[in-house]
Image (cartoon, grey):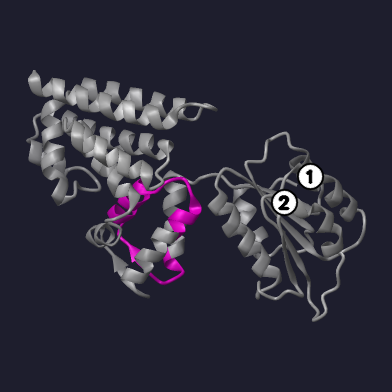
Amino acid sequence: MKIDARSVARILREPGALRVILLHGDDSGLIRERARLAATAIAPNLDDPFRVAVLDRDAADRLDEEIFALSLAGGRRVVWVRDGGDSLTAPLKASLARPSDTLVIVEAPGLASRARLRALAEAQADCAAIACYPEEGRALEASIRQMLAEEDIRIDPDALSWFAGLLGPNRAATRGEVEKLALYAGRGGQLSLDDVRMCIGDAAGVSLEDAAFAATAGDRAGADIAIERALAEGTSPIAVARSLLSHLHRLRRARIAMDGGQSRADAMRGLRPPVFFKRTDAFGQALSLWTAARLMEAAEQTQRLELECKQTGAPDLALCRRHIARLAATAMAGRRR
């Protein structure tokens, strides 16, 4: 059966009588994290060879043997398959026709929507098909807050918003950055915006932010260096587009406030979260180079960039570099005007 987003946490915490949990989607880090949660719900010690068997995609011929093996020490067993595909469909279907209390967890990143394995898991009442796609917006912020709450750590709203805006679409990378914050804050701590910036100042997201600020301020050389660093550190082209779009919208809000009579300083202070003090010069310079109309046009071009990057086979890295160069050129034209 297909599991909706609201029921995922409960299913992973209490698999009950389920015999198969299929985890599919684009976020391999989230798939691995959820597989681990489901496995520990059955076998708290994942290093126990009598209760946990880990197989790769080429071990489909061992699946039946592992599913029906007995646990010598007692307790329910887990068969955890990494990088599963349609080759598992036939052996899984055959095993479901025979009684067993073993839970089979299948990681299947990139599984096609019409895959036979997915159709099997969605059709069977004792199977769960769980989609694992990158979180964004409020869902991502809620996950970050939950991870920190596990260590009794609180985070200021502006710090949470800034931090979430830096993260790419991989849950494993998000978890790593959150763990870094938790170590910095300590159990029971409180994280401010300055704390978060200080702690993750070497993250790829900071390079991405550097690229956005440099490009809109007309610094072509600085933007080129920053975007190359961000891409080399693993930032996805989709994250580039979304970060740029967020930055352009903040510039446009401030520019509209200035057009309404506010001073540049007041317009910048009115943004939430506020502009980081080390970036006020670049942000202010960009406000002097762009009109609200040109910022809107740049935002629309950035939205098209995200759509283009999502097309199969698109040269997404080249598209990102070209877009950064185009923004810097537009800003420089504003300076000449």
Q: Amino acid at mark 2?
A: Arg
Q: Is residue 57 left or right of residue 134?
A: right
Residue 56, position as x, y percentages in the image: 71, 55
Contact between labelled residues 2 and 1, with CB atoms less than 8 Å apart: yes
Q: Which residue is mark 1?
A: 87
Whichever of callouts 1 and 2 sits on the residue coming sooner in the sequence is 2
Q: Residues within 10 Å of mark 1 (few under 14, many from 20)?
A: some
Q: Is residue 149 magenta?
A: yes
Residue 10 image-quadrant placement: bottom right
Residue count near mark 2 (Cα–Cα under 10 Å), binned few <14, some 14–19, many ≥20: some
Q: Residue at x 81, y 50 (%)?
A: 125
Magenta span: 148-175
Q: Determine which quarter of the picture holds residue 228.
A: top left
Which residue position is annotated with label 2? 57
Q: Nearer the viewer, residue 161 or 80?
A: 80
Q: Position of residue 78 (x, y in %)?
A: 74, 66
Which image quarter is the C terminus in? top left
Q: Identity of the amino acid at label 1?
A: Ser
* Residue at the far top in the pictured view: 337
Magenta-span inclusion, residue 127:
no
At mark 1, the secondary structure is helix
- Residue drawn 33% across and 30% down? 321
Q: Nearer the viewer, residue 220 or 238?
A: 220
